Image: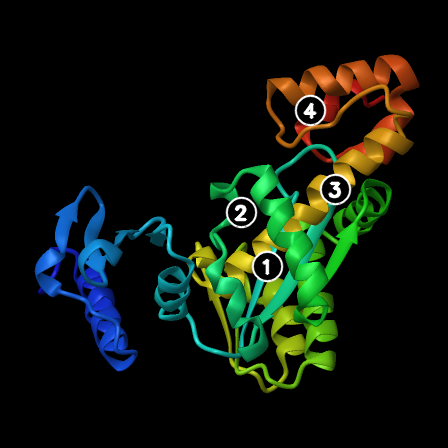
Amino acid sequence: MGIYAKDEALSGYIERAYVEFLRLKIPFDPETVKEINYGVSFKVGEGKGAVSVAVYHTERKGFSVVTSDAKIRSILLSLLTETGTVGNDEAGKGDLFGPLVVCSFILGERESELLKLHVADSKKLKDTEIIGIYDQVQKDHPNAFAALRIMPEKFNRAFEVATAKNQNSNNILAWAHSKTLERLLAKRGDAKRILVDQFSDNSFVNRPIIEAAGSTPIDFRVRAEQNPAVALASIVARAIYLKSLKEIGETVLEGKLVLTPGSGPDADILLKKAVGSFGAEIIQKIAKANFANCTPYKN
């Protein structure tokens, strides 16, 4: 049991926050800290200018910071990472339609201002928030990331090659991660560590990523999105994925259908409509053909 919460990791985080607020000469009264479901709430500042903050933590989801004050959010998020951290994440892996997108994102000194935004795992954000953050990153920090988009036709060809080698989609994903990492490290020399959202614990599968990291320390971690660098990588990857879905709908499907993420019943309905309008061959151009959703249309 910690000083501020029964959750020792959360209590330790609040202790670090207290020290940081003292260093920055920002008033923080520890007496305002109260335990809430899965977290703590507290006040930062004095009198009417005091800001409400809630910090949540679970072993499964990690840390989450909620506050309306951009400066306080930036300070608290900065405690979850270190300057020079490269985060790697992907989007589209579990979605039937659209590409597989991988992104490497470096959170250097120049990018620290992004922590004022609502930076979180893209799964916790609305599509409009994801696109908004991505557009700002593109405008102000285009050199902060490297992304790779593997469109359906290319992915399906790569999957066939992988299958012939007794490999699977994780091998394709690892290759993509290695390429974005190589591209980012080639243009940024301030990387101090690399954090990859773990999708495989197979050392053979992860080898290309490790080799791409070179001498930069690398760590593979489950649910790594609690780190802001990985969260930003997930946001960029998801934004590119969402934009790609729209692009495919407008071009390949001639605007007749609007593709959506996912691989459940709604995806089955969309796939049936697409095949009905364009024939089974359309699958190769809009979907990941290895998904079970596509089985009914295979010869």
Q: Is residue 128 left or right of residue 218?
A: right
**Which residue is label 1 attached to?**
233
- CB contact under 8 Å: marks 2 and 3: no
Front residue of 130/57: it is: 130
Front residue of 171/250: it is: 250
The residue that appears at 53% across and 47% down in the rendered structure is: 122
Whichever of labels 4 and 1 marks the residue nearer the N terminus, that label is 1
- Tell which tag, 3 or 4, sits nearer the viewer: 3
The N terminus - image quarter = bottom left
Residues under labels 3 and 1: Cα distance? 16 Å
**Which residue is label 3 attached to?**
243
Q: At label 2, which amino acid type do we have?
A: Ser
Picture coordinates of residue 103, whole percent (x, y): 66, 60
- Tell which tag, 4 or 1, sits nearer the viewer: 1
**Which residue is label 2 attached to?**
122
The C terminus - image quarter = top right
